[in-house]
Image (cartoon, rainbow, N blue to C red):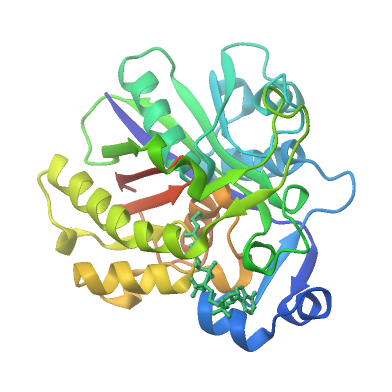
Amino acid sequence: MRSVLLGVGGQLPSRVLTNEELAQRVDTSNEWIVERTGIRERRIAAEGEKTSDLALAAARAALTHAGREAKDIDLIIVATATPDLTFPATAARVQANLGVTHGAAFDLQAVCSGFVFALATADNFLVRQQAKCALVIGAETFSRIVDWQDRGTCILFGDGAGAVVLEAQAQESERGVISTFLRTDGRMHDLLYVDGGPSETGAVGKVRMQGNAVFRQAVEHISGAMLEACARAETSIDAVDWFVPHQANQRILDGVARRLGIDATKVVSTVAEHGNTSAASVPLALDTAVRDGRIKRGDLVLMEALGGGLTWGAALVRM
Ligand code: UT7
């Protein structure tokens, strides 16, 4: 069996927050943000607009694109670090709002690597025939956990959601998830974390990051994960048509491309418009490049991400 990616969808809140607006709140400038991150603007969820709302809209778009209906879905995984509530899972709310009344739905927490982890998880369910058709969603409202006084982090993040539909199909075609690679190293917990949670503080908390240290880890581990995913598929980086990275910082995208000798025109970048949407960033970038016609059926796509944990990983998919 293969997990074939049938459709992709995205959802962004309508409110645009520009660098200029941020420069009125904290000691920063549009020039600094663009030069150090590539980010020009990001989207911010409206009051009352929840992670599950963004996830639901992205899921519906992915279902339409896939030519499937909600009733076909028997597995929903929402990768998020910003769930609606501590519990139940945001995925349970998405399931109910889609009108799905069978199968399983749960959240997965790997922060910015969440979508890649969720894709690998769903692939295992489908290949083992424990589910037939899965919605894999990355959805975040990071604006709710950003410290808007901290210029080192508040300039980076944005809100949004992206989703894909994966279906188990007999392995006749080349299409589908070919290989995945996941890693966690909990020793780097304190490089990127939220300083609150139900068990430790009883409060939601805010994002804390040693940006420069994370940056140094990112280029090395992302490159390694990409090479490993290719090695597991017995292919090479040169065979990949499109690279869909986690959108943390344009300098990380450029650094990885330089290190692996990747032509910059093959790297999908949405960081300028979306900022870092954590678990949503990879499926949002995928959606952008599928919809504008760059990524076509049959293309070999390599996705990658690194986030809090630290977690990192990559997934190689034939579209
Ligand atoms: O998605 C999960 C993974 N996350 C990431 O991959 C994020 C990785 N990190 C980054 O993207 C970068 O480290 C940042 C964009 C967060 C920061 O860029 P940097 O080039 O690593 O800057 P830095 O942290 O080394 O700080 C350099 C200087 C400092 O000033 P001093 O100490 O040299 O005087 C900072 O205080 O830049 C200052 N700075 C700012 N200045 C203007 C930090 N943030 C800002 C800001 N505006 N927004």
Find residue 28 and report its horizontal and vertical position in percent.
70, 80
Quarter of image, res 49: top right
Quarter of image, res 237: bottom left
Which quadrant is the N terminus positioned in? top left
- In the picture, measured across the screen, residue 204 lies left or right of residue 222, that is right
Number of numbered discs on residues: 0
- In the picture, measured across the screen, residue 187 lies left or right of residue 291, that is left
- In the picture, measured across the screen, residue 86 lies left or right of residue 64, that is right
Identify the residue at image location x=77%, y=48%: 144
> Of residues 272 and 130, which is closer to you in this image?
272
Relative to 149, is 164 above or below?
above
Quadrant of ligand 1: it is bottom right
Identify the residue at image location x=41%, y=58%: 245
- In the picture, measured across the screen, residue 77 lies left or right of residue 293, that is right
Find residue 134 and report its horizontal and vertical position in percent.
49, 27
Q: Is residue 300 visible?
A: no
Identify the residue at image location x=65%, y=26%: 91
Find residue 122 and report its horizontal and vertical position in percent.
42, 27
Find residue 125 and report its horizontal and vertical position in percent.
39, 19
**In this view, which residue lies farthest toward the left?**
234
Quarter of image, res 57: top right
**In this view, which residue lies farthest toward the right?**
47
Q: Is residue 56 visible?
A: yes
Relative to 258, is 137 above or below?
above
